[in-house]
Image (cartoon, rainbow, N blue to C red):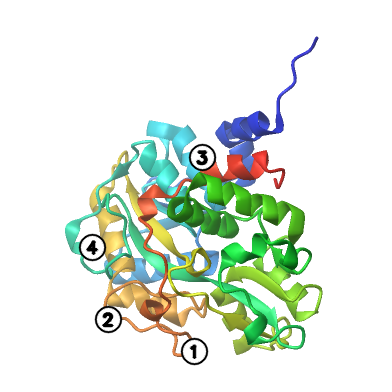
Amino acid sequence: MTPTLSRRTLIAALLASPVVLSACSGDEKYVPDPEALQIYSSQHQNVTEAWARAFTDATGIKTQVRSGTDSSMGHMIVQEGDASPADVFLTENSPAMTVVERAGMLAPVEETTLEQVGEGRAPSSGMWTGIAARSTVLVYNTSMITPAELPASMMDLQDAAWAGRWGCAPGGADFQAIVAGMLVDRGEEETAAWLEGLKDGAEIYQNNIATMKAVNAGEVPVGIMYHYYWYRDQAGTKEGSGNTELHYFGDQDPGAFVSLSAGGVLATTDKADEAQQFLAYLTSPEGQEVLVSSGSMEYPVARGVPADPALPPLDSLDAPLVDPSALDSDKVVMMMTDAGIL
């Protein structure tokens, strides 16, 4: 009898495959310039490139950006190992950074850099730092549901009363980071039960924007996503959000999870000083102003740097207290696979 791979085993194999991961990066023709600081990034490309240009203008240090997605780039760096050309790694969500951290491939971030970011905006390990932040929100259609009818907790969405009435994008790194926060905050049993509720009751969309547009179009009354998609659309045509508002769960609920975009220096770099300078720049007031002025509507994490005035203050969101070093994206992928979601 020919043995067959379970779906769970197959996904684990794909996560570990350098061939597949290279293909997922969408940058197969990348040729590193040995004279340039190599920035592997899954952060928004426009923000990363704005940071790189501003850093080069300020220091004269040449930079080169290789773009990809969180999971593919994190695992690609691990697969490349000591031969990785990467000097710096930037992520959209921090679980991808913890993959590299757990592989022992990061150098400690300089203390002066960590001192530039606010409390809770870097992991307890000190092996990387937050460079931006985004909040989980519930987007809702104001003609389909009243504020009084909204769930008190994101955990309530597993209840049968919400079946077919909420949407999300579980295939994306954003949503998986939210579940990783839930896993740390509520444990495996509660998280597994919530994922079963998702499988049975949620409408699945490709990404956060599709989720927001589905709510706006009245396909479902509510959806889970990050805040900045709504604020960017509101600052523009409102085509995808004109019929909606945002609900912040607060009260340290898993639905109030704040995800950090992360920056780390590879332990194998031969440009350690330049790499540390780059992280110091990203978290400086000047670097954080580049983020704010980019129009990304993400939160700055540096002390004393205000966010776009349209956003509620980050410290007012009452997010759950989660050490980002504890976030485990691979575990979340396995749990989603076991639940039949992925």
Which comes sooner in the sequence, label 1 or label 3?
3
Question: Between tags 1 and 3, which lies in front?
Answer: 1
Q: What secondary structure is found at the residue carrying circle 1?
A: loop
Residue that label 4 marks: 113
22 or 330, which lies in front? 330
Amino acid type, mark 1: Ala
Which residue is under mark 1?
A: 310
Near mark 1 (Cα within 10 A), the count class, few <14, some 14-19 or many ≥20, is few
Answer with mark 1 or mark 4, whichever residue precedes in sequence. Answer: 4
Residue 76, disc: 3
Which residue sits at x=77%, y=73%?
220
Q: CA distance from mark 2 to mark 1?
A: 17 Å
In primary-sequence order, the first of circles 2 and 1 is 2
| Callout 4: SS | helix
**Which amino acid lies under the numbered mark 2 shown in the image of this protein?**
Gly
Q: Residue 304, which numbered label? A: 2
x%, y% of residue 106? 32, 43
Judge the density around disc 4: few (<14), some (14-19), many (≥20) Cα neighbours within 10 Å.
Answer: many
Distance of label 2 from label 3 (alpha carbons): 35 Å
Residue at position x 35%, y 39% in the image: 105
Residues at marks 1 and 3 touching, judged by CB atoms closer than 8 Å:
no
Tell me the quarter of the picture where residue 266 sits: top left
Q: Nearer the viewer, mark 2 or mark 3?
A: 2
How busy is the neighbourhood of tag 2: few (under 14 within 10 Å), some, or many (20 plus)?
Answer: few
User: Which amino acid is tagged 4?
Assistant: Thr
Horizontal and vertical percent position of residue 82: 37, 32
